[in-house]
């Protein structure tokens, strides 16, 4: 992970929170700046300070589809009319003031030789079902946004204070899924879940997991991946062994290490060191290859068992934090801080000149994509879900890469995941006042 303005000289700070304001701060800044800027006041209405204060005090637990009333009551239970502005005005203001973090200056600018395309938002794949507002979502690293685990449509997991919470998106009920003995142990940087396993990686090179059919913390296991002073666990993916049904956890770490743990024995069975920090990985469906992105502009394609780098793909202009491998076996997506999502074809990584060849290059709406998910087989027309650093969730036609659906809320995003065979999409918002779990349901019909 790159150096954040808040990091200073501390290689392992307690929190590297987002530098952009959360919803209430955004509204307060808007109101305050308008009082100091005559031109801003002249541009139109600004939020009412009294109504901002009321909004901060009053917070619904759940917002259902049937409660939505446009600017009177949106996905997050915000009445923009009471604030004295429209949601569209707030969106324009947010777009104008949001800062997309980059490690390479101007990497997110549109270049004349760039093939990045902002897709037309004309699709309608998913519709809003509900959002459960929670103020205890704990986002500790501004670049690492894979902190949502989904085991089923009724079991979603996210980091809270000293615990991992289990949330049922269908009922809104919560309970504790995992407790931590110390403050340092609860500094979660990444989280993942399958139907069988919940696992979390921490700031200090540690991990902790439990089997979801167990009695809970009594049967939790933990381990240490590295004691390096910059040993943040950046990403974890749970997958079966290619040779057996044994569950494995593949960890990408900030100390340049990539390690695989056999969860049946709680033992590190593979450790490979690379040339930079690894931020995200995804295994191919045949479990032979792995795509890896990290603190490098290039995308790595490695042998899943030996770790040998087979391809180094050029095209991105900044560090990478998101990737996924589609169920078809050859379509790969990577998301970097340059605000581009690149699509690759495993049948032809490079052209006859040896140049890296992207099938498509999609430009994001406001910030870099930090979580990517292809829809599962059998769920309908294939889509790629791209959650940006904040606000925007893009649902992209993953057959043509020409069109998309856009779902937007206000707040930092902590990840997206499919459930219910791809018929439900779960998203985590980490906003301090209007964050929580949002559920969307598939609403289009058609062949894959």
Image: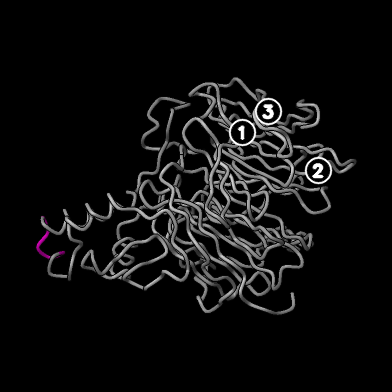
Tell me the residue that label 2 is attached to: 240
Specify whether 177 is left or right of 105. Answer: right
**Nearer the N terminus, badge 1 or badge 3?**
3
Q: Residue at x 44, y 36 (%)?
A: 3
> Within the image, what quadrant is residue 308 found in?
top right
Q: Residue furthest right?
A: 243
Between 77 and 237, the one lying in front of the other is: 77
Tell me the residue that label 1 is attached to: 253
> Looking at the rendered structure, which numbered label has been put on residue 220?
3
Q: What's the distance in space between the residues labelled 2 and 1, CA to CA?
A: 20 Å
Residue 375 % position (x, y): 68, 63
Crowd band around label 1 with a 10 angstrom C-alpha radius: few (<14), some (14–19), many (20+)? many
Specify whether 111 is left or right of 266. Answer: left
Between 37 and 209, the one lying in front of the other is: 209
Q: What's the distance in space between the residues labelled 3 and 2, CA to CA?
A: 19 Å
Q: Are marks 2 and 1 in contact (CB under 8 Å)?
A: no
> Within the image, what quadrant is residue 75 found in?
bottom left
Q: Residue at x 77, y 52 (%)?
A: 284
> Which image quadrant: the C terminus?
bottom right
Residue 24 % position (x, y): 29, 51
Specify whether 191 is left or right of 327. Answer: left
Examine the rendering and report whether any part of residue 110 can be seen: no
Task: For mark 1, give the secondary structure.
Answer: strand
Specify whether 191 is left or right of 247. Answer: left
Q: What's the distance in space between the residues labelled 1 and 3, CA to CA?
A: 22 Å
Q: Which residues are magenta?
A: 36-40
Q: Nearer the viewer, mark 1 or mark 3?
A: 3
Up the image or down, 443 lies above or below 79; here it is below
Residue 16 % position (x, y): 42, 36
Between 358 and 150, the one lying in front of the other is: 150
Task: For mark 3, give the secondary structure.
Answer: loop
Q: Are marks 3 and 2 in contact (CB under 8 Å)?
A: no
């Amino acid at each position: 992970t790159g150096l954040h303005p808040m990091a200073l000289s501390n290689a392992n700070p307690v929190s590297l929170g987002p530098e952009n304001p959360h919803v209430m701060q955004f509204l307060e800044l808007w109101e305050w700046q308008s009082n100091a800027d005559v031109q801003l006041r002249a541009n139109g209405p600004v939020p009412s300070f009294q109504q901002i204060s009321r909004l901060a005090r009053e917070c619904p637990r759940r917002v259902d589809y049937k409660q939505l009333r446009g600017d009177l009551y949106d996905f997050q239970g915000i009445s923009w009319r009471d604030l004295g502005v429209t949601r569209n005005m707030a969106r324009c203001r947010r777009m104008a003031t949001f800062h997309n973090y980059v490690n390479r200056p101007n990497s997110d600018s549109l270049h004349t030789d760039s093939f990045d395309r902002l897709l037309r938002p004309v699709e309608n794949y998913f519709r809003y079902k509900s959002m459960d507002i929670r103020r205890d979502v704990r986002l500790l690293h501004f670049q690492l946004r894979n902190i949502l685990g989904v085991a089923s449509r009724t079991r979603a997991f996210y980091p809270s204070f000293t615990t991992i919470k289990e949330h049922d998106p269908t009922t809104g009920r919560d309970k504790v899924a995992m407790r931590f003995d110390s403050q340092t142990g609860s500094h979660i940087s990444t989280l993942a879940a399958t139907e069988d396993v919940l696992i979390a990686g921490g700031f200090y090179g540690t991990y902790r997991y439990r089997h979801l059919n167990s009695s809970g913390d009594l049967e939790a296991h933990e381990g240490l991946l590295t004691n390096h002073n910059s040993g943040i666990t950046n990403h974890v993916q749970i997958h079966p062994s290619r040779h057996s049904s044994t569950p494995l956890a593949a960890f990408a770490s900030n100390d340049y290490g990539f390690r695989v743990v056999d969860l049946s024995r709680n033992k590190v069975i593979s450790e490979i060191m690379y040339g930079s920090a690894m931020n995200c990985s995804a295994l191919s469906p045949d479990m032979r290859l792995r795509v890896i992105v990290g603190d490098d502009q290039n995308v790595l394609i490695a042998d899943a068992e030996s770790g040998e780098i087979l391809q180094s793909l050029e095209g991105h202009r900044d560090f990478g934090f998101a990737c996924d491998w589609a169920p078809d076996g050859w379509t790969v997506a990577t998301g970097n801080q340059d605000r581009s999502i690149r699509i690759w074809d495993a049948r032809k990584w490079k052209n006859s000149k040896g140049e890296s060849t992207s099938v498509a290059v999609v430009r994001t709406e406001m910030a870099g994509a930090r979580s990517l998910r292809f829809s599962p087989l059998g769920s309908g027309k294939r889509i790629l879900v791209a959650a940006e650093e904040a606000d925007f969730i893009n649902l992209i036609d993953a057959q043509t890469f020409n069109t998309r659906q856009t779902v937007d809320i206000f707040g930092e995003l902590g990840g997206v995941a499919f459930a219910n065979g791809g018929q439900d999409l779960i998203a985590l918002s980490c906003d301090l006042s209007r964050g929580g779990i949002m559920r969307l349901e598939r609403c289009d019909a058609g062949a894959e």
